Amino acid sequence: MQHLKIGTWCLLCLWSLTAIGGDYGFQVRYASLVFQQDAVALTSGIDYRFSNTLVEALDNGVPLTLTVTTRIRQPRRGLWDETVWRRDLDFQIQYYPLSQVYRVVDETNRFQRSFPRLESALVALGELNEIAFSIEEGWTPPRPSYGEVEVWLNIERLPWALRPIAYFSPEWRLHSNPYRWWISQ
């Protein structure tokens, strides 16, 4: 029994080192929200570095969905801050080998663009400029509150056969740390 515990511990250590040692991941560099009468506009910069496994899957025709979550949260006593507003943006990227293009689809706003190289598509994915979300007219966030933006590979949108592998592989479980800033009104 003790041998099993040591083996499990070693496996977890190796697994975590693989996740740390990889030259891939997502990072939100900056984000801001501008409040208007009946809308909130998000501007954000995100760096996407796909693992070799993701690039291989993409090159073999597997569509990948990236979800960008934007929240306004209010600090409160206790364990968790309260989320007072949340919107998700889903972006799908897919490679078409016959035409040799990467197609990026903004599924939320039903907009698509094509790129000849993966690097160009990832740069475009990371530039979110004044994406508007409707809000109730005159709504303002409570004081104090902060904004939060994070992004992850949406494993639930992968083909069924890949999901079990993706749940347990660090090369598939890509998720940024949340980018946070205080909202001033």
Image (cartoon, helix red, strand yellow):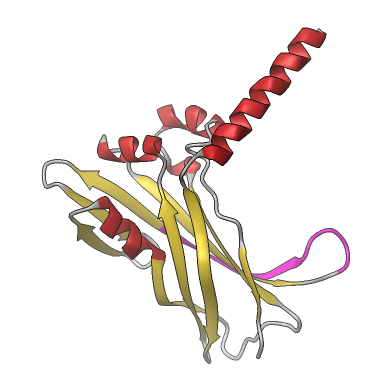
Say which of 33 and 89 sits in front.
33
Report the quarter where the N terminus lies: top right
Q: Which image quadrant for residue 74?
A: bottom right
Q: Which image quadrant for residue 91?
A: bottom left
Where residue 124 appears, x then y in whole percent?
32, 64
Any magenta on residue 119? no
In the shown orientation, is residue 164 left or right of residue 8? left
Q: Which residues are magenta?
A: 77-90
Where residue 129 appears, x then y in whole percent?
40, 76
Q: Residue at horizontal 65%, vertical 82%?
A: 183
Say which of 110 and 42 sits in front.
42
Where residue 166 appears, x then y in whole percent?
49, 33
Say which of 49 and 155 sits in front.
49
In the displayed image of the protein, which residue is found farthest to the right? 77
Q: Is residue 122 above or below residue 84?
A: above
In the shown orientation, is residue 64 left or right of residue 163? left
Q: Residue at horizontal 51%, vertical 58%?
A: 27
One can see residue 82 in this view: yes
Report the quarter where the C terminus lies: bottom right
Q: Residue at horizontal 49%, vertical 28%?
A: 165
Q: Residue at horizontal 70%, vertical 19%?
A: 8
One can see residue 104 in this view: no
Count of marks, rendered view = 0
Q: Is residue 179 above or below residue 33?
A: above
Where residue 148 appears, x then y in whole percent?
62, 68
Helix, strand or loop for the magenta stretch, by majority: strand
In the shown orientation, is residue 18 left or right of residue 73? left
Q: Is residue 109 above or below residue 67?
A: below
